């Protein structure tokens, strides 16, 4: 589960602690990467050598794993993350135009962050909210039956929220 | 007066339309009025157009009201909803609602009714009777029962579950595994999610039975990061199960041992493919493995492994409890039992409809689903997720059955149906299918990795009205290459939505003109 906000600044010690917490699992790579991203808001490049050592892999292997998965960020996102569903059921309810309109109004591309560093808009392919489409996750909070007014309202709400913690996944 | 129980879903789709706000309004209004109420947060009954749907426990049974907005709450109290009084939003007893009354709920028997984290509720609803039976029968007879039930994998391919289990049971190994594939990445599907959120013990029991049946003491649930709420409920259920002796050693006082962990993917659709899932669980890139060897023989960490879809596993308890024949008596032909159909997209009555196989597609979409939400004509229905075909209304006579769909070059897949009205642009949907494949390809084979990108470009040329006939031929060629040259169904099935769009909606491809053509 990825959280929307940066919670802790990078320290080697903290990263080592997070890695140690999960390394005894069978196949610990993904749980560790999720935990690092939850802790630091992204998976810092500085974590790669630590992971390589813990998992007994080369740095290139670790990089290959991180880059394969859409979830892992190697740089921080905005303070708030809005994941807008682009999949078919949401499209059938006008989700495509809705998302394009939002990006246009914010002057962003998919994955982009507003100039004030407040909001990142990310694509997501299905949230399982397909019967209450179109849908989005706003800092982990689900919103369905979206229309332009509702989407703008939730985006503006988080855009005006300067607290560092924000709302996170359930 | 006694305390009145009020049931409000905390299913994420109900939350997405305001269930938490309604719960707060109910608590606040009850406090204001001094009414004694106790809130129970449930999963969803799966009538999403009525969410947030609130049920009140009355002398006449549970009476539902929906869709409830926070501003409706004072009026509902004033009207006397604690006694089940009439109100503009009154639905009545959910069981009597035509949408639910027409269903056969076996896998979803408790979903939306029980407190998902209450073992007492689960057992009161028939939970753990299946495991008790399986313990009595032993592993071999349990596998036999699952085979006899005719249950086929609900994850897409429809492979007989009993046969898969027997292969794992007969394999000799120091360790075997049960994996629940809960990666549910298909658009239009949410049944796995609803069980994770609404009846997690059903999955835990099903996996425990699977472990007993094949001799596996360890299991993993591989879910997805797009489902944070479902994962939180499942994680909590696992803790409860461990604390109550329903996982670990000596389950239900027997010598059954089963340990279960929840793992969460990281936003890669292809990790729903079973061998990519295994790679991902092992901590690698989710690259598809060539088969053979089958995961049943060489799966997780090289050990014999059952990989089953969540619905397949969650259906095991009722099969063991009620008997193989009971289950097999539902359905038609080689499609036995019930299928949780998921109605989604532009549909009036979106939701979960569990029914025996054999209705027609038209009955499901038009009668049960009520047609489109926009009240415009239905133009296309995509069945079986992003790799599934688009069907036009002229094919609404297709029976909902694995073979009948296959005969029409379509798939049932995980049971999702996404409805589109007449404003849909099918060339755009074909382009999206290619784009999705390009985005999600694991990269192992060229037709899928490169072909999908080329496919999107070709559709772009068609959309721009350039050499349309030649480009359609090129697109069809490309689809054939992908179909026959891909290692897994991501590349192999992307042609289904693309080719079905061209075949059934040619006017969306041929009528294209360059906007500046007259110049
Ligand atoms: C690209 C791709 C994605 C898949 N996604 C899922 C999925 O999300 N859930 C699932 O159960 N099966 C999925 N499958 C099918 C699995 O590979 C596998 O057949 C299934 O989990 C077996 O379980 P079952 O026999 O119970 O259906 C997918 C297959 C492919 C090719
Ligand atoms: S078809 Fe695509 S996803 Fe499947 S193995 Fe080949 S490259 Fe990977
Ligand atoms: S398609 Fe958007 S939530 Fe499923």
Image (cartoon, coloured by chain):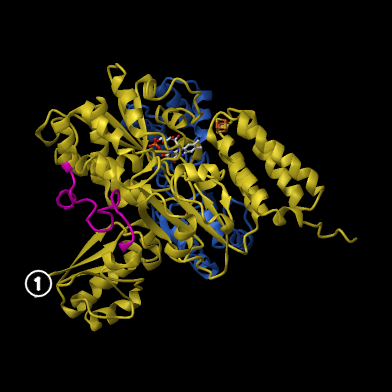
Above-or-below relation of A69 to B509: above
Relative depth, front residue between B276 and B108: B108
Residue B355 colored in magenta in the image: no
What letter labels the chain drawn in blue? Answer: A
The chain assigned the colour yellow in the figure is: B
Q: Say which quadrant the C terminus of chain B sits in.
A: bottom right
Where's the N terminus of chain B, which quadrant?
bottom left
Query: Mark 1 = which residue?
Result: B2
Is B123 part of what is drawn in magenta? yes
Element class at badge 1: loop
Residue A109 drawn at (x, y percent): 62, 52
Res B168 seen here: yes
Residue furthest out toward the front: B333
- Viewer-side residue, A63 vs B117: B117
Say which residue appears at 30% left-offset and 63% top-offset: B101
Question: Foreground residue, B225 or B128?
Answer: B128
Residue stretch rendered in magenta on the structure: B101-129
A110 displayed left or right of B15 = right
């Amino acid at each position: 589960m990825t959280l929307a906000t940066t919670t802790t600044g990078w320290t080697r010690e903290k990263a080592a602690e997070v890695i140690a917490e999960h390394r005894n699992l069978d196949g610990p790579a993904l749980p560790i990467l999720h935990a690092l991203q939850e802790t630091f808001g992204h998976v810092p490049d500085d974590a790669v050598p630590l992971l390589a050592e813990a998992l007994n892999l080369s740095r290139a292997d670790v990089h290959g794993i991180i880059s394969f998965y859409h979830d892992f960020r190697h740089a921080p996102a905005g303070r708030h993350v809005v994941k807008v569903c682009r999949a078919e059921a949401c499209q059938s309810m006008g989700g495509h135009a809705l998302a394009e309109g939002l990006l246009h109004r914010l002057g962003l591309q998919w994955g982009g962050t507003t100039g004030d560093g407040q909001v990142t808009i990310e694509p997501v392919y299905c949230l399982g909210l397909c019967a209450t489409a179109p849908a989005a996750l706003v800092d982990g909070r689900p919103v369905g039956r979206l229309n332009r007014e509702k989407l703008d309202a939730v985006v503006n709400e988080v855009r005006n929220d300067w607290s560092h913690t924000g709302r996170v996944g359930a | 007066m006694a305390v009145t129980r009020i049931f409000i879903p905390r299913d994420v789709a109900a939350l997405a339309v305001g269930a938490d706000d309604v719960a707060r309004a109910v608590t606040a209004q009850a406090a204001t009025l001094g009414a004694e109420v106790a809130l129970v947060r449930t999963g969803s009954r799966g009538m999403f157009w009525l969410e947030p749907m609130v049920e009140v426990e009355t002398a006449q049974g549970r009476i539902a009201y929906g869709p409830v907005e926070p501003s409706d709450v004072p009026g509902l109290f004033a009207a006397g909803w604690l006694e089940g009084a009439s109100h503009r939003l009154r639905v009545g007893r959910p069981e009597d609602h035509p949408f639910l009354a027409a269903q056969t709920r076996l896998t979803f028997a408790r979903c939306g009714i029980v407190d998902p984290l209450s073992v007492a509720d689960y057992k009161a609803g028939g939970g753990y009777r299946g495991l008790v039976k399986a313990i009595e029968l032993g592993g071999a007879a349990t596998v036999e029962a699952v085979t006899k039930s005719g249950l086929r994998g609900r994850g897409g391919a429809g492979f007989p579950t009993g046969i898969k289990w027997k292969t794992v049971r007969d394999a000799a190994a120091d360790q075997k595994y049960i994996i629940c594939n809960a990666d549910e990445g298909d658009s239009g599907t949410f049944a796995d999610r609803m069980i994770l959120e609404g009846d997690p013990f059903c999955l835990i029991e099903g996996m425990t039975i699977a472990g007993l049946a094949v001799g596996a003491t360890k299991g993993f649930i591989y879910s997805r990061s797009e489902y944070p709420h479902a994962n939180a409920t499942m994680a909590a259920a696992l803790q409860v199960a461990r604390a109550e002796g329903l996982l670990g050693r000596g389950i239900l006082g027997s010598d059954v041992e089963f340990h279960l962990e929840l793992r969460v993917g990281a936003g890669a659709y292809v990790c729903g493919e079973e061998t990519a899932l295994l790679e991902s669980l092992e901590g690698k890139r989710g690259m598809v493995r060539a088969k053979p060897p089958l995961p049943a023989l060489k799966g997780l960490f090289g050990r014999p492994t059952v990989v089953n879809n969540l619905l397949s596993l969650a259906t095991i308890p009722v099969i063991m409890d009620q008997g193989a024949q009971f289950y097999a008596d539902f359905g038609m032909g080689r499609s036995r039992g019930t299928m949780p159909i998921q109605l989604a997209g532009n549909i009036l009555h979106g939701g979960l409809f569990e029914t025996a196989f054999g209705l027609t597609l038209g009955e499901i979409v038009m009668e049960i689903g009520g047609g489109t939400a926009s009240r415009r004509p239905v133009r296309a229905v995509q069945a079986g997720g992003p790799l599934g075909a688009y069907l036009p209304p002229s094919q609404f006579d297709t029976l909902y059955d694995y073979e009948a769909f296959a005969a029409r070059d379509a798939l049932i897949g995980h049971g999702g149906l996404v409805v589109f009205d007449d404003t849909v642009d099918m060339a755009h949907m074909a382009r999206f299918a290619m784009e999705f494949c390009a985005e999600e390809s694991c990269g192992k084979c060229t037709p899928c990795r490169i072909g999908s990108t080329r496919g999107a470009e070709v559709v772009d040329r068609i959309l721009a009205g350039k050499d349309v006939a030649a480009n359609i031929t090129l697109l069809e060629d490309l689809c054939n290459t992908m179909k026959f040259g891909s290692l897994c169904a991501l590349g192999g099935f992307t042609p289904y939505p693309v080719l079905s769009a061209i075949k059934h909606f040619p006017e969306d491809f041929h009528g294209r003109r360059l906007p500046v053509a007259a110049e």
